[in-house]
Amino acid sequence: MTHTTHDLAAVVHRSGHKLTPQRQIILDTLCEMGGHVTVAALYERVHGRYPAIDRSTVYRALDFFGELGLVSAATIGGAAVYEIAGATAAGDDAAHHHLVCLGCGHIDHAPGEAFVAFAAHLQAAHGFAADVSRLTIEGLCRECNGE
């Protein structure tokens, strides 16, 4: 178990819940796979190593971890993807948004604070309270845009 999964396991225990062996395996595998993991990919990896774990167990574990705030979900390219909440490729725990390239499919992260001013503008100009906690923005990455 890595330091990251050890910390996440501590959150489960502090919440008064059990980290069953199945949940531990799924959490370890999700951490190992990194971000933007589909249920199908996660299930394939888990089931390949532990055939007794079925797809419904993976779904239930993801729901459980989501309720505890350990795992976040996003819809990217029409598919639900999961990652450790707040985790980025850079390894920090800051909230972030997803920038999805329509050309090559590359996914990058934008820091959460980048959209605070935008939300404030929407509130001031339109009286609209925008939820900018999870955004997926589609466009072209630097390479596909020719920069």
Image: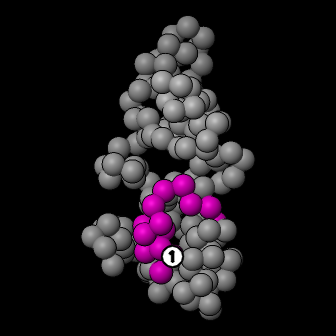
Which residue was labeled with disc 1? Answer: 26
Residue 65 as seen in the image, left or right of residue 101: left
Q: Is residue 41 visible?
A: yes
Quadrant including the N terminus: bottom left
Q: Is residue 1 left or right of residue 48?
A: left
SS at badge 1: helix
Amino acid marked by disc 1: Ile
Image point 68% across, 77% down: which residue?
A: 55
Q: Which residue lies furthest to the top in this view?
A: 125
In magenta, the rendered stretch is 25-39
Tell me where residue 137 appears, x and y as whole percent.
58, 32
Q: Can residue 137 be seen in this view?
A: no
Locate residue 131, reporting x and y percent.
55, 32
Label 1 environment density (alpha carbons within 10 Å; few <14, some 14–19, many ≥20): many
Q: How many numbered marks does the figure carry? A: 1
Q: Is 40 within the magenta?
A: no
Toward the viewer: 12 or 61? 61
Q: Could you say where residue 113 lies in the image, as x and y percent from the top left? A: 38, 30
- Please report the residue visible at 41 percent of the width from the left and 27 percent of the height from the top: 114
Q: Position of residue 23 (x, y in %)?
A: 50, 78
- Name the residue: 49% across, 30% down: 142
Which image quadrant is residue 57 in?
Answer: bottom right
Picture quadrant of residue 18: bottom left
101 left or right of 1?
A: right
Please say if 3 is above or below 133: below
Residue 139's place in the image compared with 19, above or below, is: above
Residue found at the far left of this picture: 3
Assign the magenta stretch its main secondary structure: helix
61 is higher (above) or lower (below) than 102: below
Residue with the most extreme right position: 78
Q: Which residue is drawn at the image coordinates 31% and 73% (left, top)?
A: 2
Residue farthest to the front?
146
